[in-house]
């Protein structure tokens, strides 16, 4: 496991102590054509929950029918926190459900509007430091399609207060977002069962 030493072997001249540097907020991007981008982000959310962080998951999807196993697990952990105090609180929102604060259904224009409203809510929460850990799942797509302004997103994330970690997933992450991130992982497909005509499987895809 990396010990925090830069590749050049020098300590950054940023005026921060080792402890301060260890507690800096992280902006991470999981992108690329391979499988595992969201799965890795939700795994990080489990770690955040274990640390007692408030976790907010925002899925930028079109269908409320899309279910992932991690949703049930994290919602259950949110219930554990409510009943026992263990871990942290969990919220899970989907664009396909009209989020939790709007109820919109309809054509593609409505989806774009819903994505924008979802982003506005995330901005409000970042400003209020509502969560300590955010997963913006499949968020690269509304950026790619022009529904949400990438420059505005980068500016908001750069200026977010406190120690809020943000993890963004999805293919084709804009270069501007990649440049702004602290941690970028590209999932590259080598092989996939679907290449051989196999279908998605329980416990693997959902």
Image: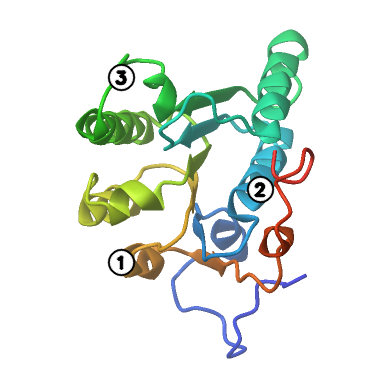
Q: Where is residue 182 in the image (x, y as percent from the top left)?
A: 48, 64
Crowd band around label 3 with a 10 angstrom C-alpha radius: few (<14), some (14–19), many (20+) = some
Point 66% across, 48% down: residue: 39
Quick one: 49 or 70, which is closer to the camera?
70
Label 3 residue SS: loop
Ranked by sequence position, the earlier of labels 2 and 1 is: 2
Does residue 202 appear to the left or right of 57 in the view shown?
A: right
Ranked by sequence position, the earlier of labels 3 and 1 is: 3
Q: Is the C terminus in the top left, top right, bottom left or bottom right quadrant?
A: top right
Does residue 58 appear to the left or right of 22 in the view shown?
A: left
Quick one: 75 or 127, which is closer to the camera?
75
Ranked by sequence position, the earlier of labels 2 and 3 is: 2
Looking at the image, residue 194 lies above or below residue 4:
above
Q: Position of residue 90 (x, y in %)?
A: 60, 24
Point 67% across, 64% down: residue: 195
Label 2 residue SS: helix
Residue named by callout 3: 105
Point 74% across, 35% down: residue: 50
Residue named by callout 2: 39
The answer for how far apart the CA atoms under marks 2 and 1 are is 24 Å
Quick one: 119 or 156, which is closer to the camera?
119
Residue named by callout 1: 176
Quick one: 81 or 29, which is closer to the camera?
29
Label 1 residue SS: helix
Considering every residue shown, the one lying at the far top of the view is 83
Q: Is the N terminus in the top left, top right, bottom left or bottom right quadrant?
A: bottom right
Between marks 2 and 3 in the image, the one whose residue lies nearer the viewer: 3
Between marks 3 and 1 in the image, the one whose residue lies nearer the viewer: 3
The answer for how far apart the CA atoms under marks 2 and 3 are is 28 Å
């Amino acid at each position: 496991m990396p010990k925090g030493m830069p590749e050049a072997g020098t300590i950054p001249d940023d005026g921060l102590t080792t402890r301060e540097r260890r507690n800096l907020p992280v902006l991470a991007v999981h992108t690329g054509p391979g499988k595992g981008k969201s799965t890795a982000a939700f795994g990080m959310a489990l770690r955040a929950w274990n640390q007692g962080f408030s976790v907010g998951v925002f899925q930028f999807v079109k269908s409320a029918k899309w279910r992932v196993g991690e949703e049930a697990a994290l919602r259950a952990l949110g219930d554990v926190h409510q009943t026992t105090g263990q871990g942290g609180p969990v919220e899970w929102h989907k664009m396909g459900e009209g989020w939790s604060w709007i109820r919109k259904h309809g054509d593609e224009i409505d989806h774009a509007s819903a994505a924008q409203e979802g982003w506005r809510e995330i901005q409000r929460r970042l400003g209020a430091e509502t969560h300590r850990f955010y997963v913006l799942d499949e968020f690269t797509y509304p950026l790619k399609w022009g529904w949400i302004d990438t420059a505005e997103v980068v500016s908001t994330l750069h200026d977010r207060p406190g120690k809020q970690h943000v993890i963004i997933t999805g293919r084709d992450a804009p270069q501007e977002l990649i440049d702004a991130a602290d941690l970028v992982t590209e999932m590259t497909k080598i092989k996939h069962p679907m290449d051989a005509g196999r279908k998605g499987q329980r416990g693997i895809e959902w």
